[in-house]
Image (cartoon, grey):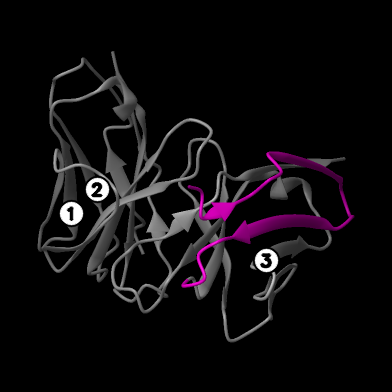
């Protein structure tokens, strides 16, 4: 097991810009989920991809989008950044069923100025 | 509208004693519950889970109790050790509801005093 990795560790952007965050899932995990954790809050579900298709989304606007690739890597893209997008972004990978353990990466800390 | 609530932001327990972390939920569709532990600068790590068909699940020093009628679950850690100091998140999901992800509480910061 190689674990879930995320890049970059930290990122600073200005309002209105676009950002791409990256995640590398554990080998064999077909499902990747992305979460946003604001300061003092628990992680909040953004969306989930299964075999390169989005198959679930939380209460986030369309400017949050993603991609999943066959090599177990994935991306979270956020357009038109707002100050409230400042948060820790976590990705989690699992085999596929909701009851399968989700393994989280260390997160990317995004600051929007 | 918080569907998963952890009402204690922090909890201090002496080493060797029992730590009890509590969690309440409001969504009656939730049928699968999990506890995650998080150290600073790391992602959450899965600890233990419980399905709604059970009222107790045990794994070593960790036991989760589920009271469906009260929509309440608790995590017991016995005995508490210094390495248990971390933020603990309660999470829930509707296992038959499709890809809705996990709904997390705000977390409880557990501090184990020597």
Alpha carbon distance from label 2 to label 1: 6 Å
Residue B47 spot, x, y in % from top left: 58, 63
Query: Is residue B14 highlighted in magenta?
Result: yes
Q: Position of residue B28 (x, y in %)?
A: 52, 71
Answer left or right for B76 relative to A25: right
Say which residue appears at 58% left-offset and 86% top-offset: B53
Q: Toward the viewer: A76 or B106?
A: B106
Percent x, y of residue B72: 67, 65
Q: Residue at x 40, y 76 (%)?
A: B95
Q: In the rendered view, would you say B68 is above or below B54?
A: above
- Which of the labelled discs sits on residue A73, or is there none? 1
The residue to which callout 3 is attached is B73
Query: Could you say which is closer to the camera, residue A108 or residue B101?
Result: B101
Q: Nearer the viewer, mark 3 or mark 1?
A: 3
At a point 49% along the width and 53% down the height, the residue shown is B104
* Residue receiving disc 2: A23
Chain of the residue displaying label 2? A
Q: Magenta span has B21?
A: yes
For the magenta stretch, what is the residue range?
B1-29
Is B32 rendered above or below residue B53?
Answer: above
Q: Chain of mark 1?
A: A
Residue density around tag 2, few if under 14, some if 14–19, many if 20 or more, within 10 Å: many
Residue B12 image-quadrant placement: top right
Q: Quadrant of residue B62?
A: bottom right
Q: Are marks 3 and 1 on the same chain?
A: no
């Amino acid at each position: 097991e190689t674990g879930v990795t995320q890049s970059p560790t930290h990122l600073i952007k200005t309002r209105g810009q676009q950002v791409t965050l990256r995640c590398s899932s554990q080998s064999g995990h077909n499902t990747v989920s992305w979460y946003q954790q604001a300061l003092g809050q628990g992680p909040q579900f953004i969306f989930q991809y299964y075999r390169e298709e989005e198959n679930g989304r939380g209460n986030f606007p369309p400017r949050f989008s993603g991609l999943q690739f066959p090599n177990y890597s994935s991306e979270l893209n956020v357009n038109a950044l707002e100050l409230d997008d400042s948060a820790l972004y976590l990705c989690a990978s699992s085999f596929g069923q909701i009851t399968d353990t989700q393994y989280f990466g260390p997160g990317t800390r995004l600051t929007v100025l | 509208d918080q569907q998963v609530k952890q009402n204690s932001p922090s909890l201090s327990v002496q080493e060797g004693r029992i730590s009890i972390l509590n969690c309440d939920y409001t969504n009656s569709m939730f049928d699968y519950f999990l506890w995650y532990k998080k150290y600073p600068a790391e992602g959450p790590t899965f600890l233990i889970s419980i399905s709604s068909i059970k009222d107790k699940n045990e794994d070593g020093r960790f036991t989760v109790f589920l009271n469906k009628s009260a929509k309440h679950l608790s995590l017991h850690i016995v005995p508490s050790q210094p390495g248990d100091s971390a933020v603990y998140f309660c999470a829930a999901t509707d296992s038959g509801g499709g890809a809705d992800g996990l709904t997390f509480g705000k977390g409880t910061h557990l501090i184990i005093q020597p």
